[in-house]
Image (cartoon, grey):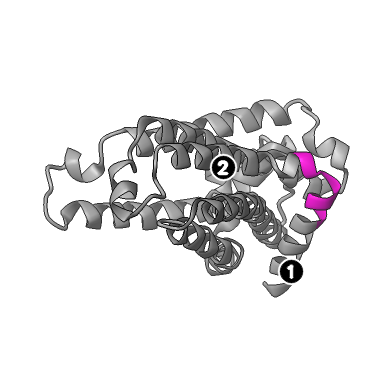
Amino acid sequence: MWQDIRRAYGDTWRFAGLAPALFLVPAVVEFVQHVAEIEIGMYAGREAARAVADHPLRMALGFAKVIALMLPGYWLTRYMAWRDVRRSWRPESPAVALFLTLLAIKAAVQALQLFGPSAGALLGLDGRGPGAVTAALGIGSLILGIYLTAWFVAWPLGNAAVGPVRSTGVMAGSFWRTLGITVATALPLMVLHYALGLGAIGRAPALVWGMMAADAVVVAFLAHLMTAGMFVAARTAASRRGVALVP
């Protein structure tokens, strides 16, 4: 597992140096959202942050950021498979169609989570009920995502043979390994991301701008590291099952 984690970090750094324009796409979208947050006064103080947390502009840009975070799923996955920067972003058939289908599915789920009613509200719960439902759904999404990892990796490579059902079979037996890789590649920068966001509240304007610029770069690394973690986890699981991820 540690070799997979090292490769995920190493390939992320390598790709950042080889294709900085692609690498910084999530950073640009994240920073645009931060600009909007600063303009609506989100970092003026904790009360202000709570008041504008659901501001329509912030929510719309948040959805755009979610899409941007998914884009490395195409180019970094392909780079790690073939070590070819030009091929990583080239819209090859059927890979681009498969990836866009996957992107649309994920985007629809995220849109429902961001803009749809909460599960607690739909169930008519109050008190701690909505929070418990949200936590349960989060854990369920994490578990489901682990079993669908091979699918998330295979389609950007143009391999339609590995869909959701087959992905579950491929990842069976690799759950804890994949969970460990996921935690190792996502958690450190996720903690830093939230620390910068919360730490900027109430700070001097110049410091807020600096922290938000740093956070945008952190988010770019986070997006690519999560993709790299999925690739190495799926590759190991598929190898154990004798399944080819690369068509």
Is 18 a magenta residue?
A: yes
Q: Which residue does the image show at 39% across and 42% down from the upper left?
A: 41
| Residue 67 visible here | yes
Residue at position x 56%, y 69% from top? 180
In terms of depth relative to the viewer, which is nearer, 237 or 177?
Answer: 177
Task: Classify 132 as above or below 94.
Answer: below
On whether residue 92 falls in the magenta region, the answer is: no
Image position of 165 with respect to 232: above or below = above
Q: Which residue is mark 1?
A: 6
Q: Secondary structure at mark 2?
A: helix
Residue 30, numbered circle: 2
Spatial CA distance of label 1 from label 2 is: 26 Å
Res 247 seen here:
no
Classify residue 37 by image quadrant.
Answer: top left
Considering depth in this image, is 186 or 245 the residue closer to the camera? Answer: 186
Viewport quadrant of the C terminus: top right
Boundaries of the magenta span: 14-21
Q: Identify the residue at horizontal 77%, vertical 39% (top origin).
A: 21
Which image quadrant for residue 159? top right
Q: Main secondary structure of the magenta part?
A: helix
Q: Amino acid at mark 2?
A: Glu
Secondary structure found at label 1: helix
Q: Position of residue 73 (x, y in %)?
A: 66, 43
Q: Amino acid at mark 1?
A: Arg
Label 1 CA crowd tier, 10 Å (few <14, some 14–19, many 20+)? some
- Residue 95: x %, y % from top left: 72, 31
Left or right, 4 with respect to 170, comes to right
The number of discs equals 2
Q: Viewer-proximal residue, 28 or 47?
A: 47
- Name the side, left or right, on which 215 lies relative to 81: left
Residue 142: percent from left, percent from top: 45, 55
Q: Residue at x 60, y 66 (%)?
A: 181
